[in-house]
Image: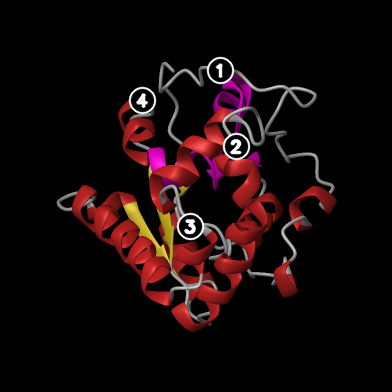
Amino acid sequence: MSSKIFIIGLPRTGTTSICNSFLQLGYKTAHTAYTQQAITTADVIADTPVFSEYALLAKHFANSRFINLERDLAKWLPSIRQLLTRMHTNLMRPDGGFNIHLKRCYLDVFGHYSLADLESDEYLTACYQRHQQQIAEYFKGREHQLLTLNVADPNSPQLLQQFLNTEQPISFKQLNIGGKVTAWNDIKHPDKVSSTRSGKIDKSLGYNHT
């Protein structure tokens, strides 16, 4: 299996911005991937399903590398709260709503939360910190496979250059400002990989056999 780069930061930590940067660097990039073809074709994959299933992907795609994204909690909390509030109905309904892979990954990280849960900074902070701790534990002893970035940090472009062993210029353009989450849809680029097949998903993504 070919090596890949998986961006395993949680939603609202800058995944769209870094995916856009990878497009500019010439990588085939998928922001979410819900078909075997998307998983196979993309060099770089972010968001669902990778933020919760990176361990399965690491076993399936040997020699892959991983980028974890951090964000200042004071900025992440209101942003993720807004997103999860908007997603609540379609995440929790048993008769449809979001696709099975998106549901599985969000529920894995955020639980079967209520709207009241979202009012609690403690609840959301615990989800964030648990994710960071699980990543730290999984990559213990294999830290060379992992880069942790905060895209708001001015040193991040240089750190990514070193990780990729490239001298190509890198910058992070701030996208999805003000609660928007659709910036990726608006990006036109030949290396952008569609997450679905004309709107359809695969029940199994190859690596997870579901």
In this view, 40 is above or below 54:
above
Q: Nearer the viewer, mark 4 or mark 1?
A: 1
Highlighted magenta segment, given as a residue range: 27-53
User: Of the residues shown, which amino acid type is indicated by label 2?
Assistant: Arg
Disc 2 and disc 4: Cα gap in Å?
Answer: 31 Å
Q: Is residue 191 left or right of residue 138?
A: right
Residue denoted by label 1: 203
Q: Decide if residue 31 is in sight here.
A: no
* Residue occupying the point 65% across, 39% down: 28
User: Of the residues shown, which amino acid type is indicated by label 4?
Assistant: His
Residue denoted by label 4: 60
Q: 103 or 146: which is nearer to us?
A: 103
In the picture, the quarter occupied by the N terminus is top left
Q: Secondary structure at mark 4?
A: helix
Disc 2 and disc 1: Cα gap in Å?
Answer: 18 Å
Disc 1 and disc 3: Cα gap in Å?
Answer: 23 Å
Residue denoted by label 3: 10
* Residue 75 inside the magenta-drawn segment: no
Q: Nearer the viewer, mark 2 or mark 3?
A: 2
In this view, 31 is above or below 210:
below
Q: Secondary structure at mark 2?
A: loop
Q: Earlier in the sequence, mark 4 or mark 1?
A: 4
Residue 118 lies, in percent from the top left, at 50, 66
User: Of the residues shown, which amino acid type is indicated by label 1?
Assistant: Lys
Residue denoted by label 2: 93
The circle drawn on residue 180 is: none
